[in-house]
Image (cartoon, rainbow, N blue to C red):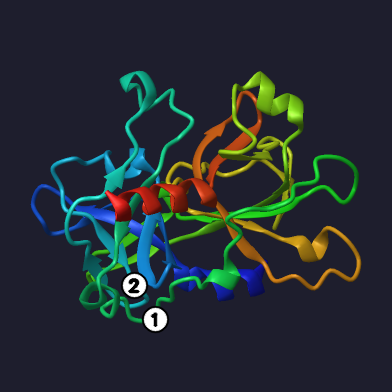
Amino acid sequence: MAVLGLSFLPSIRPLAVPNDFGDELIPAGTAVLIWYRGERYVLSAAHVVELYPNYTYYIGSMRSWIEIPGPWTVNRPSGGNREGDTIDIAFRHAPNAFAEQLDGCTFLSADQQATTEQVRFNGPYRSKYVAIGYPLNAFKIKRYSKTTVPGNIAYAGGIASPDSYINEKLSATANLVLDSKWDSIVGEKGLQTSPKLEGISGGAIIRLRSIEGLGDLTRPQLAGITIEERRQARLLVGNRLGVYTEAINRARTA
């Protein structure tokens, strides 16, 4: 997990907005940086970038906060209800002048992405993933030094069962769903309750084929973006990366 974090965290970044006085930042969620068809993009969840509609969003580089220029492109929620929508995507083209300000950050290349994937639902070799993001309650402000410390979290789990998809009215082609036994996870302290995950929406869901079967040397790949946790159903829900790239394709040809 530590090695995975070191390799992917430069591409998984916190989002924040200034408070009403402009002297401190308010954590807003998570974003992921990718290359796609020769251009760079910032991906997140629509409800994250709609949380503060009249505020400028900033993305955390390794050393500073950089203003994100211009509006996000978001999907239109079915029935006008974002909260009940299972497609919850936002993206923003990253022009060169903006991308070059993101010191220490990297945009995931095509070989680090899984826009399509073969999923195994059953048995010990079922598909495995890790979700990485920045919980809101892990965001710390050191006022004496005027610095921020956005803490991150990684949650590893297997693909949810086909019945879970059906029961929760989720799409196996559009949604990536992980088991999330939040009240009995294994962490640094052994068996424990999961910390609050609010804020990891917009973060990365990474496929870990190397732990699914012996001898598989496939590199970890970005497979989806987190959009919500359904605690009652014990599921962590995301949208597949292919949903984003299809939306980007439509935007580029519009």
What's the CA distance linking mark 1 and mark 2? 7 Å
Q: Label 2: which residue?
A: 61
Verify CB contact (< 8 Å) between mark 1 and mark 2. yes
Which residue lies at the image location 70% right of the left edge and 44% below the top edge?
A: 192
Give the number of the disc on residue 104. Answer: 1
Taking the image as drawn, is residue 225 in sight? no
Query: Which of the 4 image quarters holds residue 100?
Result: bottom left
Which residue lies at the image location 84% right of the left edge and 69% below the top edge?
A: 216
Judge by depth and name the residue closer to the eye, 189 or 248. Answer: 248
Amino acid at the residue labelled 2: Ser
Q: Position of residue 73 (x, y in %)?
A: 28, 47
Judge by depth and name the residue closer to the eye, 219 or 47. Answer: 219
> In the rendered view, does 113 fall on the left or right side of 137?
right
- Split into 4 quadrants, where in the image is the N terminus? bottom right
> In the rendered view, does 245 fall on the left or right side of 98?
right
Q: Position of residue 91 (x, y in %)?
A: 34, 52
Label 1 crowd (10 A; few <14 / some 14-19 / many >=20): few
Taking the image as drawn, is residue 212 in sight? yes
237, above or below 16, in the image: above
- Kindly give the residue lying farthest to the left in the view shown: 21
Query: Which of the 4 image quarters holds residue 35?
Result: bottom left
Which residue lies at the image location 31% right of the left edge and 53% below the top edge?
A: 253
- Kindly give the residue lying farthest to the front in the view shown: 253
Query: Which of the 4 image quarters holds residue 96?
Result: bottom left
Which residue lies at the image location 40% right of the left edge and 76% below the top edge?
A: 105
Q: Position of residue 173 (x, y in %)?
A: 61, 38
